[in-house]
Amino acid sequence: MKYRNRTLAALVAVGALSLAACSSGDADETTAPTGGDGEADFSGETLKVLHYEGDDSAMGIAWNRAIEIFEEQTGATVDLQVTAFEDLNASAEQLFDSSDAPDVSEYNKGNGTAGQLAAIGVIQNLDDAYEKYGWADKLGAGIDTIAKYNEDGVMGSGSFYGVPNYGEFVFMYYNVEMFEEYGVEVPTSEAELEAAMQTFVDAGITPLTTSAQEYPMGQLWYQLALSQADRSFVDAYQLYTEEVNWQGEEISYATETLDEWVSKGYISSDVSGMTAEDAGLQYINGEVPMFYSGSWWYGRMLSDVTDFTVGITNWPGTTLTPGSGGNIWVVPVESEQPELAEIFIDITMSPEVQALMGESGGLPVAANTADVQDADAQALIELFNEVNDRDGLSFYPDWPTPSFYGDLNGVMQGLVNGTFSPEQAQSELENYYESYVSTVR
Protein backbone atom coordinates (compact mmCIF):
# COMPACT_ATOMS: atom_id res chain seq x y z
CA MET A 1 0.00 0.00 0.00
CA LYS A 2 1.27 3.35 0.51
CA TYR A 3 3.05 6.49 1.41
CA ARG A 4 -0.05 8.19 0.69
CA ASN A 5 0.67 11.65 0.08
CA ARG A 6 3.80 11.70 2.08
CA THR A 7 4.31 8.99 1.65
CA LEU A 8 1.99 5.82 0.46
CA ALA A 9 2.60 -4.73 -1.17
CA ALA A 10 2.75 -15.41 -4.62
CA LEU A 11 3.50 -15.39 -2.93
CA VAL A 12 7.03 -16.40 -2.73
CA ALA A 13 9.78 -15.70 -0.29
CA VAL A 14 10.86 -12.13 -0.79
CA GLY A 15 14.26 -12.50 0.77
CA ALA A 16 15.72 -10.74 -2.22
CA LEU A 17 14.30 -7.52 -0.81
CA SER A 18 16.75 -7.63 2.06
CA LEU A 19 19.77 -5.41 1.79
CA ALA A 20 21.91 -8.47 1.21
CA ALA A 21 21.02 -8.10 -2.45
CA CYS A 22 24.09 -6.66 -4.14
CA SER A 23 24.61 -4.85 -7.39
CA SER A 24 27.74 -4.80 -9.44
CA GLY A 25 30.09 -1.88 -9.53
CA ASP A 26 31.46 0.49 -6.91
CA ALA A 27 29.16 2.48 -4.67
CA ASP A 28 30.36 5.82 -6.02
CA GLU A 29 30.01 4.81 -9.62
CA THR A 30 26.95 5.30 -11.81
CA THR A 31 26.88 3.87 -15.30
CA ALA A 32 26.37 6.47 -18.00
CA PRO A 33 23.26 5.91 -20.10
CA THR A 34 24.50 4.65 -23.41
CA GLY A 35 21.39 2.89 -24.71
CA GLY A 36 23.72 0.15 -25.93
CA ASP A 37 25.11 2.22 -28.79
CA GLY A 38 27.57 4.50 -27.05
CA GLU A 39 26.78 7.47 -24.82
CA ALA A 40 23.75 9.42 -26.01
CA ASP A 41 23.17 13.17 -25.86
CA PHE A 42 19.61 14.27 -25.20
CA SER A 43 20.29 18.00 -24.82
CA GLY A 44 17.16 20.03 -25.30
CA GLU A 45 14.85 17.14 -24.42
CA THR A 46 12.55 17.14 -21.38
CA LEU A 47 11.51 14.16 -19.26
CA LYS A 48 8.30 14.51 -17.25
CA VAL A 49 8.65 12.59 -13.97
CA LEU A 50 5.67 12.15 -11.63
CA HIS A 51 5.74 10.78 -8.09
CA TYR A 52 4.10 11.27 -4.70
CA GLU A 53 7.01 11.19 -2.25
CA GLY A 54 7.94 14.05 0.06
CA ASP A 55 11.33 15.71 -0.34
CA ASP A 56 12.32 14.51 3.13
CA SER A 57 11.34 10.89 2.55
CA ALA A 58 14.06 8.37 1.72
CA MET A 59 12.66 7.90 -1.77
CA GLY A 60 12.32 11.63 -2.36
CA ILE A 61 15.92 12.24 -1.30
CA ALA A 62 17.23 9.41 -3.48
CA TRP A 63 15.17 10.32 -6.51
CA ASN A 64 16.18 13.98 -6.33
CA ARG A 65 19.77 12.77 -6.59
CA ALA A 66 18.77 10.51 -9.49
CA ILE A 67 17.37 13.56 -11.26
CA GLU A 68 20.68 15.39 -10.81
CA ILE A 69 22.63 12.43 -12.21
CA PHE A 70 20.19 12.03 -15.09
CA GLU A 71 20.49 15.68 -16.13
CA GLU A 72 24.29 15.59 -15.84
CA GLN A 73 24.63 12.44 -17.92
CA THR A 74 22.01 12.96 -20.60
CA GLY A 75 21.89 16.73 -21.05
CA ALA A 76 18.09 16.48 -20.80
CA THR A 77 15.97 18.43 -18.33
CA VAL A 78 13.57 16.89 -15.84
CA ASP A 79 10.13 18.39 -15.32
CA LEU A 80 9.34 17.01 -11.86
CA GLN A 81 5.67 16.84 -10.93
CA VAL A 82 4.66 15.83 -7.40
CA THR A 83 1.13 14.72 -6.60
CA ALA A 84 -0.73 12.96 -3.77
CA PHE A 85 -1.14 9.21 -3.73
CA GLU A 86 -4.93 9.41 -3.56
CA ASP A 87 -5.09 11.85 -6.47
CA LEU A 88 -3.01 9.63 -8.74
CA ASN A 89 -4.84 6.52 -7.61
CA ALA A 90 -8.09 8.12 -8.78
CA SER A 91 -6.83 9.64 -12.03
CA ALA A 92 -4.08 7.37 -13.40
CA GLU A 93 -6.19 5.48 -15.92
CA GLN A 94 -7.27 8.70 -17.62
CA LEU A 95 -4.02 10.62 -17.08
CA PHE A 96 -1.69 7.93 -18.44
CA ASP A 97 -3.80 7.62 -21.60
CA SER A 98 -3.90 11.37 -22.30
CA SER A 99 -1.72 14.07 -23.82
CA ASP A 100 -0.95 15.23 -20.25
CA ALA A 101 0.67 11.90 -19.33
CA PRO A 102 4.05 11.97 -17.60
CA ASP A 103 6.88 10.11 -19.29
CA VAL A 104 7.56 8.02 -16.20
CA SER A 105 5.59 7.79 -13.00
CA GLU A 106 5.60 6.16 -9.61
CA TYR A 107 2.46 4.06 -9.26
CA ASN A 108 0.85 1.67 -6.82
CA LYS A 109 1.54 -2.01 -7.43
CA GLY A 110 -0.99 -4.81 -7.23
CA ASN A 111 -3.83 -6.38 -9.17
CA GLY A 112 -6.31 -3.55 -8.77
CA THR A 113 -3.89 -0.79 -9.73
CA ALA A 114 -0.85 -1.53 -11.92
CA GLY A 115 -2.37 -4.86 -12.93
CA GLN A 116 -5.58 -3.21 -14.05
CA LEU A 117 -3.71 -0.61 -16.15
CA ALA A 118 -1.46 -3.28 -17.65
CA ALA A 119 -4.48 -5.38 -18.65
CA ILE A 120 -6.15 -2.49 -20.49
CA GLY A 121 -2.94 -1.25 -22.12
CA VAL A 122 -2.51 2.05 -20.29
CA ILE A 123 1.07 1.34 -19.18
CA GLN A 124 3.84 -0.02 -21.38
CA ASN A 125 5.29 -3.53 -21.44
CA LEU A 126 8.89 -3.27 -20.16
CA ASP A 127 10.20 -6.72 -21.10
CA ASP A 128 12.71 -5.28 -23.57
CA ALA A 129 13.96 -2.73 -21.05
CA TYR A 130 14.38 -5.44 -18.40
CA GLU A 131 16.55 -7.39 -20.82
CA LYS A 132 18.52 -4.34 -21.89
CA TYR A 133 19.31 -3.05 -18.40
CA GLY A 134 19.36 -6.33 -16.47
CA TRP A 135 16.84 -5.16 -13.89
CA ALA A 136 15.58 -8.66 -13.10
CA ASP A 137 19.06 -9.61 -11.89
CA LYS A 138 19.14 -6.59 -9.60
CA LEU A 139 15.72 -7.36 -8.15
CA GLY A 140 16.55 -10.96 -7.40
CA ALA A 141 14.18 -13.91 -7.10
CA GLY A 142 10.76 -13.12 -5.69
CA ILE A 143 10.50 -9.37 -5.81
CA ASP A 144 9.45 -9.44 -9.45
CA THR A 145 6.05 -10.71 -8.26
CA ILE A 146 4.78 -7.12 -8.09
CA ALA A 147 6.45 -6.10 -11.36
CA LYS A 148 4.83 -8.79 -13.55
CA TYR A 149 1.18 -9.03 -14.64
CA ASN A 150 -0.63 -11.48 -16.87
CA GLU A 151 -3.27 -10.63 -19.46
CA ASP A 152 -5.93 -10.43 -16.73
CA GLY A 153 -3.82 -8.06 -14.64
CA VAL A 154 -3.01 -10.63 -11.94
CA MET A 155 0.45 -10.21 -10.46
CA GLY A 156 3.23 -12.75 -10.39
CA SER A 157 3.38 -13.95 -14.01
CA GLY A 158 3.31 -12.60 -17.53
CA SER A 159 5.29 -9.55 -18.65
CA PHE A 160 7.09 -6.82 -16.76
CA TYR A 161 5.11 -3.58 -16.45
CA GLY A 162 6.92 -1.80 -13.64
CA VAL A 163 10.20 -1.51 -11.76
CA PRO A 164 10.34 -1.49 -7.93
CA ASN A 165 13.53 -0.01 -6.54
CA TYR A 166 12.74 -0.14 -2.83
CA GLY A 167 10.99 -2.39 -0.35
CA GLU A 168 8.40 -1.52 2.27
CA PHE A 169 6.51 -3.05 5.16
CA VAL A 170 4.29 -2.04 8.05
CA PHE A 171 5.25 -2.05 11.73
CA MET A 172 4.68 -0.25 15.02
CA TYR A 173 6.27 3.10 15.79
CA TYR A 174 6.35 3.81 19.52
CA ASN A 175 7.44 6.63 21.81
CA VAL A 176 10.30 5.24 23.90
CA GLU A 177 10.03 7.86 26.64
CA MET A 178 6.26 7.45 27.03
CA PHE A 179 6.69 3.70 27.32
CA GLU A 180 9.33 4.21 30.01
CA GLU A 181 7.28 6.83 31.89
CA TYR A 182 4.28 4.53 32.19
CA GLY A 183 6.25 1.34 32.77
CA VAL A 184 5.20 -0.26 29.50
CA GLU A 185 7.40 -2.92 27.91
CA VAL A 186 7.55 -3.45 24.14
CA PRO A 187 4.78 -6.02 23.53
CA THR A 188 5.69 -9.50 22.32
CA SER A 189 2.06 -10.70 21.96
CA GLU A 190 -1.28 -9.11 21.18
CA ALA A 191 -2.33 -9.76 24.78
CA GLU A 192 0.63 -7.70 25.96
CA LEU A 193 -0.22 -5.03 23.40
CA GLU A 194 -3.78 -4.77 24.73
CA ALA A 195 -2.47 -4.58 28.29
CA ALA A 196 -0.12 -1.78 27.26
CA MET A 197 -2.95 0.11 25.58
CA GLN A 198 -5.12 -0.27 28.68
CA THR A 199 -2.32 1.23 30.78
CA PHE A 200 -2.34 4.33 28.61
CA VAL A 201 -6.14 4.56 28.59
CA ASP A 202 -6.15 4.39 32.40
CA ALA A 203 -3.77 7.36 32.35
CA GLY A 204 -6.10 9.34 30.08
CA ILE A 205 -4.02 8.81 26.93
CA THR A 206 -5.31 7.41 23.63
CA PRO A 207 -2.63 4.80 22.90
CA LEU A 208 -2.88 4.09 19.18
CA THR A 209 -3.46 6.55 16.35
CA THR A 210 -4.65 5.62 12.88
CA SER A 211 -6.71 6.97 9.97
CA ALA A 212 -9.96 5.45 8.76
CA GLN A 213 -10.25 8.03 5.99
CA GLU A 214 -7.06 6.78 4.34
CA TYR A 215 -4.90 3.67 4.37
CA PRO A 216 -3.62 3.16 7.97
CA MET A 217 -6.74 1.62 9.50
CA GLY A 218 -7.25 -0.71 6.54
CA GLN A 219 -3.70 -1.92 6.98
CA LEU A 220 -4.29 -2.39 10.71
CA TRP A 221 -7.44 -4.40 9.95
CA TYR A 222 -5.45 -6.57 7.52
CA GLN A 223 -2.66 -7.09 10.07
CA LEU A 224 -5.16 -8.31 12.64
CA ALA A 225 -6.56 -10.76 10.09
CA LEU A 226 -3.03 -11.90 9.18
CA SER A 227 -2.27 -12.54 12.85
CA GLN A 228 -4.83 -15.36 12.66
CA ALA A 229 -3.96 -16.51 9.13
CA ASP A 230 -1.54 -18.65 7.19
CA ARG A 231 -0.11 -18.33 3.69
CA SER A 232 -3.12 -20.05 2.11
CA PHE A 233 -5.34 -17.20 3.31
CA VAL A 234 -3.03 -14.67 1.65
CA ASP A 235 -3.02 -16.68 -1.59
CA ALA A 236 -6.80 -16.81 -1.60
CA TYR A 237 -7.24 -13.14 -0.78
CA GLN A 238 -4.57 -11.77 -3.12
CA LEU A 239 -4.29 -14.33 -5.92
CA TYR A 240 -7.84 -15.69 -5.99
CA THR A 241 -6.69 -19.30 -5.52
CA GLU A 242 -9.92 -20.10 -3.67
CA GLU A 243 -12.90 -18.30 -2.21
CA VAL A 244 -12.35 -16.07 0.83
CA ASN A 245 -14.58 -16.75 3.83
CA TRP A 246 -15.63 -13.23 4.82
CA GLN A 247 -17.25 -14.44 8.03
CA GLY A 248 -14.35 -16.77 8.86
CA GLU A 249 -12.04 -16.56 11.85
CA GLU A 250 -9.36 -14.39 10.23
CA ILE A 251 -11.57 -11.56 9.03
CA SER A 252 -14.03 -11.81 11.93
CA TYR A 253 -11.17 -11.48 14.41
CA ALA A 254 -9.86 -8.37 12.65
CA THR A 255 -13.18 -6.57 12.40
CA GLU A 256 -14.41 -7.47 15.87
CA THR A 257 -11.08 -6.52 17.44
CA LEU A 258 -11.07 -3.08 15.83
CA ASP A 259 -14.66 -2.51 16.93
CA GLU A 260 -13.69 -3.50 20.47
CA TRP A 261 -10.60 -1.29 20.47
CA VAL A 262 -12.64 1.74 19.48
CA SER A 263 -15.20 1.03 22.21
CA LYS A 264 -12.44 0.64 24.82
CA GLY A 265 -10.75 3.90 23.80
CA TYR A 266 -7.63 2.24 22.45
CA ILE A 267 -8.42 4.01 19.17
CA SER A 268 -10.28 7.33 19.09
CA SER A 269 -13.51 7.61 17.12
CA ASP A 270 -12.00 10.79 15.67
CA VAL A 271 -9.96 8.63 13.29
CA SER A 272 -13.04 8.41 11.05
CA GLY A 273 -12.28 11.89 9.74
CA MET A 274 -8.49 11.80 10.02
CA THR A 275 -6.05 11.48 7.13
CA ALA A 276 -2.84 9.50 7.29
CA GLU A 277 -1.01 12.80 7.67
CA ASP A 278 -3.17 13.70 10.67
CA ALA A 279 -2.38 10.39 12.32
CA GLY A 280 1.33 10.64 11.60
CA LEU A 281 1.46 14.14 13.07
CA GLN A 282 -0.23 12.97 16.27
CA TYR A 283 2.66 10.57 16.76
CA ILE A 284 5.34 13.03 15.61
CA ASN A 285 4.02 15.67 18.01
CA GLY A 286 4.13 13.26 20.96
CA GLU A 287 0.35 13.18 21.46
CA VAL A 288 0.07 9.38 21.29
CA PRO A 289 2.55 6.63 22.12
CA MET A 290 1.92 4.32 19.12
CA PHE A 291 1.35 4.56 15.36
CA TYR A 292 1.03 1.46 13.18
CA SER A 293 2.17 2.35 9.67
CA GLY A 294 4.82 1.79 7.06
CA SER A 295 8.53 2.10 6.48
CA TRP A 296 7.80 5.02 4.13
CA TRP A 297 7.37 7.18 7.26
CA TYR A 298 10.70 6.20 8.79
CA GLY A 299 12.96 8.87 7.31
CA ARG A 300 10.47 11.55 8.21
CA MET A 301 10.12 10.26 11.75
CA LEU A 302 13.86 10.46 12.22
CA SER A 303 14.01 14.02 10.90
CA ASP A 304 10.78 15.47 12.37
CA VAL A 305 10.64 13.91 15.83
CA THR A 306 12.72 16.08 18.13
CA ASP A 307 11.23 15.62 21.62
CA PHE A 308 11.40 11.86 22.07
CA THR A 309 13.11 8.73 20.80
CA VAL A 310 11.45 6.84 17.96
CA GLY A 311 11.14 3.13 18.66
CA ILE A 312 10.23 0.55 16.03
CA THR A 313 9.03 -3.02 16.45
CA ASN A 314 7.22 -5.62 14.37
CA TRP A 315 3.61 -6.45 15.18
CA PRO A 316 3.74 -8.85 18.11
CA GLY A 317 2.97 -12.55 17.83
CA THR A 318 2.49 -12.92 14.10
CA THR A 319 4.26 -14.49 11.13
CA LEU A 320 2.53 -12.53 8.36
CA THR A 321 2.59 -8.77 7.96
CA PRO A 322 1.64 -6.25 5.26
CA GLY A 323 4.55 -5.45 2.96
CA SER A 324 6.11 -5.99 -0.44
CA GLY A 325 8.43 -4.47 -2.93
CA GLY A 326 7.74 -0.75 -3.06
CA ASN A 327 5.63 1.17 -5.49
CA ILE A 328 6.84 0.85 -9.05
CA TRP A 329 8.07 3.05 -11.85
CA VAL A 330 5.76 2.71 -14.85
CA VAL A 331 5.92 4.19 -18.35
CA PRO A 332 2.48 5.40 -19.51
CA VAL A 333 1.32 4.40 -22.97
CA GLU A 334 1.32 8.09 -23.96
CA SER A 335 4.88 8.76 -22.75
CA GLU A 336 6.69 10.97 -25.26
CA GLN A 337 10.13 9.97 -23.95
CA PRO A 338 10.09 6.22 -23.24
CA GLU A 339 13.83 5.86 -23.91
CA LEU A 340 14.67 8.61 -21.45
CA ALA A 341 12.19 7.13 -19.00
CA GLU A 342 14.09 3.84 -19.04
CA ILE A 343 17.41 5.63 -18.54
CA PHE A 344 15.99 7.48 -15.53
CA ILE A 345 14.63 4.27 -14.01
CA ASP A 346 18.02 2.64 -14.45
CA ILE A 347 19.70 5.49 -12.59
CA THR A 348 17.33 4.99 -9.64
CA MET A 349 18.64 1.42 -9.53
CA SER A 350 22.30 2.51 -9.49
CA PRO A 351 24.55 1.80 -6.47
CA GLU A 352 24.89 5.49 -5.56
CA VAL A 353 21.17 6.20 -5.52
CA GLN A 354 20.33 2.91 -3.82
CA ALA A 355 22.89 3.53 -1.06
CA LEU A 356 21.58 7.07 -0.53
CA MET A 357 18.07 5.68 -0.14
CA GLY A 358 19.32 3.26 2.51
CA GLU A 359 21.23 5.96 4.39
CA SER A 360 18.10 8.13 4.33
CA GLY A 361 15.90 5.52 5.99
CA GLY A 362 14.59 3.57 3.01
CA LEU A 363 14.85 -0.08 2.02
CA PRO A 364 16.77 -0.28 -1.26
CA VAL A 365 16.53 -3.47 -3.30
CA ALA A 366 19.82 -3.25 -5.19
CA ALA A 367 22.32 -1.69 -2.80
CA ASN A 368 25.64 -3.05 -1.63
CA THR A 369 25.28 -3.84 2.07
CA ALA A 370 28.57 -2.18 2.98
CA ASP A 371 27.41 1.11 1.48
CA VAL A 372 24.82 1.68 4.24
CA GLN A 373 26.49 2.56 7.54
CA ASP A 374 23.86 4.61 9.38
CA ALA A 375 22.72 2.97 12.64
CA ASP A 376 19.08 4.00 12.21
CA ALA A 377 19.06 2.59 8.68
CA GLN A 378 20.55 -0.66 9.92
CA ALA A 379 17.83 -0.90 12.60
CA LEU A 380 15.13 -0.67 9.95
CA ILE A 381 16.87 -3.20 7.73
CA GLU A 382 17.18 -5.62 10.67
CA LEU A 383 13.46 -5.31 11.38
CA PHE A 384 12.65 -5.89 7.72
CA ASN A 385 14.90 -8.91 7.54
CA GLU A 386 13.03 -10.44 10.49
CA VAL A 387 9.89 -10.43 8.34
CA ASN A 388 11.75 -11.72 5.28
CA ASP A 389 13.33 -14.55 7.25
CA ARG A 390 9.91 -15.91 8.18
CA ASP A 391 8.49 -15.37 4.65
CA GLY A 392 6.08 -12.87 6.19
CA LEU A 393 5.46 -10.24 3.51
CA SER A 394 1.77 -10.51 2.59
CA PHE A 395 1.07 -7.53 0.31
CA TYR A 396 -1.72 -5.03 1.13
CA PRO A 397 -5.46 -5.20 1.76
CA ASP A 398 -6.54 -2.92 -1.09
CA TRP A 399 -4.82 -4.85 -3.89
CA PRO A 400 -7.48 -7.35 -4.97
CA THR A 401 -9.81 -4.97 -6.86
CA PRO A 402 -9.46 -1.63 -8.65
CA SER A 403 -11.82 0.09 -6.18
CA PHE A 404 -11.04 -1.76 -2.96
CA TYR A 405 -8.89 1.02 -1.49
CA GLY A 406 -11.85 3.37 -1.32
CA ASP A 407 -14.25 0.56 -0.47
CA LEU A 408 -12.16 -0.54 2.51
CA ASN A 409 -11.71 2.99 3.79
CA GLY A 410 -15.44 3.63 3.60
CA VAL A 411 -16.24 0.46 5.55
CA MET A 412 -13.59 1.26 8.17
CA GLN A 413 -15.20 4.68 8.65
CA GLY A 414 -18.59 3.00 9.02
CA LEU A 415 -17.19 0.61 11.61
CA VAL A 416 -15.74 3.48 13.64
CA ASN A 417 -18.91 5.57 13.36
CA GLY A 418 -21.17 2.69 14.31
CA THR A 419 -22.88 2.66 10.93
CA PHE A 420 -21.80 -0.96 10.49
CA SER A 421 -21.58 -3.76 13.00
CA PRO A 422 -18.60 -6.05 12.45
CA GLU A 423 -20.82 -8.55 10.63
CA GLN A 424 -22.32 -5.84 8.42
CA ALA A 425 -18.85 -4.44 7.69
CA GLN A 426 -17.69 -7.86 6.54
CA SER A 427 -20.74 -8.35 4.35
CA GLU A 428 -20.13 -4.95 2.73
CA LEU A 429 -16.52 -5.84 2.04
CA GLU A 430 -17.49 -9.22 0.66
CA ASN A 431 -19.90 -7.59 -1.78
CA TYR A 432 -17.24 -5.13 -2.98
CA TYR A 433 -14.59 -7.84 -3.25
CA GLU A 434 -16.68 -10.50 -4.97
CA SER A 435 -18.24 -8.10 -7.48
CA TYR A 436 -14.80 -7.87 -9.09
CA VAL A 437 -12.98 -11.05 -8.11
CA SER A 438 -15.82 -13.31 -9.31
CA THR A 439 -15.15 -12.02 -12.83
CA VAL A 440 -11.47 -12.98 -12.81
CA ARG A 441 -11.24 -15.98 -10.47
Image (cartoon, rainbow, N blue to C red):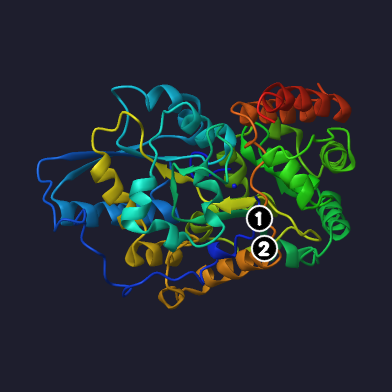
Q: Are marks 1 and 2 in contact (CB under 8 Å)?
A: yes
Residue 173: image x %, image y %?
Answer: 65, 57
Residue 103 placement: quadrant: top left
| Residue at position x 73%, y 31% in the image | 412
Residue 185 in sight here: yes
Residue 172: image x %, image y %?
Answer: 68, 56
**201 or 320: which is nearer to us?**
320
Image side of residue 151 versus residue 346, left or right: right
Residue 56 in sight here: no
Which amino acid type is shown beneath numbered disc 1? Leu
Q: In the image, is residue 290 above or below residue 95?
A: below
Query: Alpha-carbon distance for marks 1 and 2?
Result: 7 Å
Residue 351 placement: quadrant: bottom left
Q: In the image, is residue 242 above or below residue 295?
A: above
Q: Which mark is residue 393?
A: 1
Residue 82: image x %, image y %?
Answer: 36, 38
The quadrant of the image that shows the C terminus is top right
Secondary structure under the numbered disc 1 in the rendered image: loop
Secondary structure under the numbered disc 2 in the rendered image: helix
Residue 90: image x %, image y %?
Answer: 50, 25
Which amino acid type is shown beneath numbered disc 2? Val
Q: Which mark is residue 387?
A: 2
| Residue at position x 50%, y 36% in the image | 114
